Image: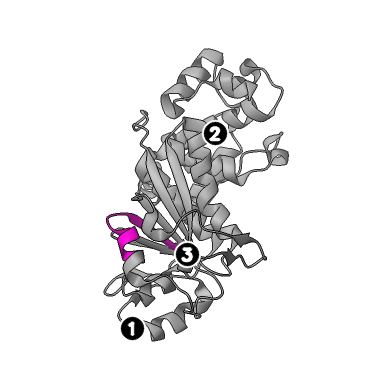
């Protein structure tokens, strides 16, 4: 469980609609950028737009397509970001072109992206969600779609979500499935915390724990507060007022990993932050993150993240 999955190459087509959210776009694209930069994975993307024309974000940024949809390379992942103008069908991309683009690819529909898919009939007899304010209207407009109020929904190769936070969670799940849990964990950690948090603040529960139960969050907080002086899993369970057996079941049910594995990833993620953004020596970083010495830390980083921490320290 400690080895890294082989890094794969993926091509991503990002389909933007008028009045799309810059925040949603960032939450879906930035984690992929982090994976590319930190692992050397061959991740490429191209920008496409509704109607093959320039679209404007909700904050007024104009974005032109890099190419017509018909000329796009076959993608492994299609990200569809709807916008506030989702009811306006003027100049929209023909359903046939969108269907050809998505053929065989995983599709993530964010914000009102599910509306775009449903309008083309792609979600008939499927489960989906979108921005919470539109759930009732969406269900009335598309009765053939099973509308769920969940933060994000996966139905086969069609994934959907509403808010930017949910988009981030969903992208991290995609990264976990494609590249492995350690890389997804690292992408979430790198994306969420600014430099001020990186310098001296205790490591908080990060993206992969945002949607978990309060009981599990309590344990994650306890772990994040004990990175330097690590605690045993039985002691953490006792502090959280839960049996060790129940704790292990909880982690597996909600995060598909063990408490020990998650705890290790928290410590390693904190170590990587300190190596990149502080002036501490590798020995000092090792001690602050609960490792006996540099050798132990370096070996664990390479095993779990396929990275050279000394190189990271120079970035």
One can see residue 211 in this view: no
* Residue sitting nearer the eye, 47 or 215: 47
Nearest to viewer (mark 1 / mark 2): 1
Q: Is residue 122 magenta?
A: no
Q: Is residue 105 magenta?
A: yes
* Residue sitting nearer the eye, 259 or 50: 50
Question: Contact, CB < 8 Å: mark 1 with mark 3?
Answer: no
Indicate the secondary structure of the residue bearing disc 3.
helix
* Residue sitting nearer the eye, 170 or 120: 120
Question: Contact, CB < 8 Å: mark 1 with mark 2?
Answer: no
Nearest to viewer (mark 1 / mark 3): 3
In the shown orientation, is residue 181 left or right of residue 59?
Answer: left
Q: CA distance from mark 1 to mark 2?
A: 44 Å
Query: Residue 274, percent across and down?
Result: 64, 28
Q: Which mark is residue 155?
A: none
Query: Residue 115, percent across and down?
Result: 43, 74
Q: CA distance from mark 2 to mark 3?
A: 41 Å
Query: Residue 139, percent across and down?
Result: 39, 82
Q: How many marks?
A: 3
Q: Which mark is residue 143?
A: 1
Query: Residue 31, percent across and down?
Result: 51, 45
Q: Residue at x 31, y 70 (%)?
A: 122
The quarter of the picture where residue 234 lies is top left
Nearest to viewer (mark 2 / mark 3): 3
Q: Which residues are magenta?
A: 98-109
Indicate the secondary structure of the residue bearing disc 2.
helix
Q: Earlier in the sequence, mark 1 or mark 3?
A: 3
In the depicted structure, whether residue 265 falls above or below residue 275: below
Q: Residue at x 36, y 28 (%)?
A: 3
Q: Give the residue at mark 2.
A: 269
Q: Give the residue at mark 3.
A: 52
């Amino acid at each position: 469980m400690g080895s890294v999955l082989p890094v794969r190459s993926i091509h991503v087509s990002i389909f933007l609609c008028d009045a799309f959210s810059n925040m949603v776009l960032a939450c879906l694209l930035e984690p992929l950028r982090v994976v590319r930069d930190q692992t050397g994975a061959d991740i490429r993307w191209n920008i496409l737009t509704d109607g093959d024309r320039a679209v404007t974000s909700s904050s007024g940024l104009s974005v032109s397509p890099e190419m017509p949809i018909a000329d796009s390379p076959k993608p492994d992942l299609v990200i569809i970001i709807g916008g506030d103008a989702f009811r306006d069908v003027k100049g929209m991309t023909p359903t046939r072109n969108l269907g050809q683009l998505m053929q065989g690819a995983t599709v993530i529909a964010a914000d009102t992206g599910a509306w775009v898919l449903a309008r083309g009939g792609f979600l008939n007899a499927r489960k989906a969600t979108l921005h919470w304010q539109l759930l009732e209207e969406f269900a009335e407009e598309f009765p053939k779609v099973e509308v769920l109020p969940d933060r994000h929904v996966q139905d086969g190769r069609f994934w959907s979500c509403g808010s930017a936070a949910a988009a981030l969670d969903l992208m991290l799940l995609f990264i976990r499935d494609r590249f492995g849990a350690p890389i997804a964990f690292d992408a979430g950690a790198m994306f969420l915390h600014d430099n001020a948090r990186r310098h001296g603040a205790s490591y908080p529960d990060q993206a992969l724990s945002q949607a978990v139960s309060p009981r599990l969050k309590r344990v994650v907080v306890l772990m994040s507060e004990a990175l330097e002086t690590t605690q045993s899993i039985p002691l953490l369970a006792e502090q959280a007022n839960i049996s060790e057996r129940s704790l292990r079941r909880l982690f597996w049910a909600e995060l598909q990993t063990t408490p020990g594995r998650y705890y290790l990833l928290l410590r390693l993620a904190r170590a990587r932050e300190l190596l990149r953004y502080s002036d501490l020596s590798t020995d000092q970083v090792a001690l602050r993150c609960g490792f006996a010495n540099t050798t132990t830390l370096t070996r664990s980083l390479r095993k779990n993240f396929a990275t050279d921490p000394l190189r990271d320290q120079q970035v």
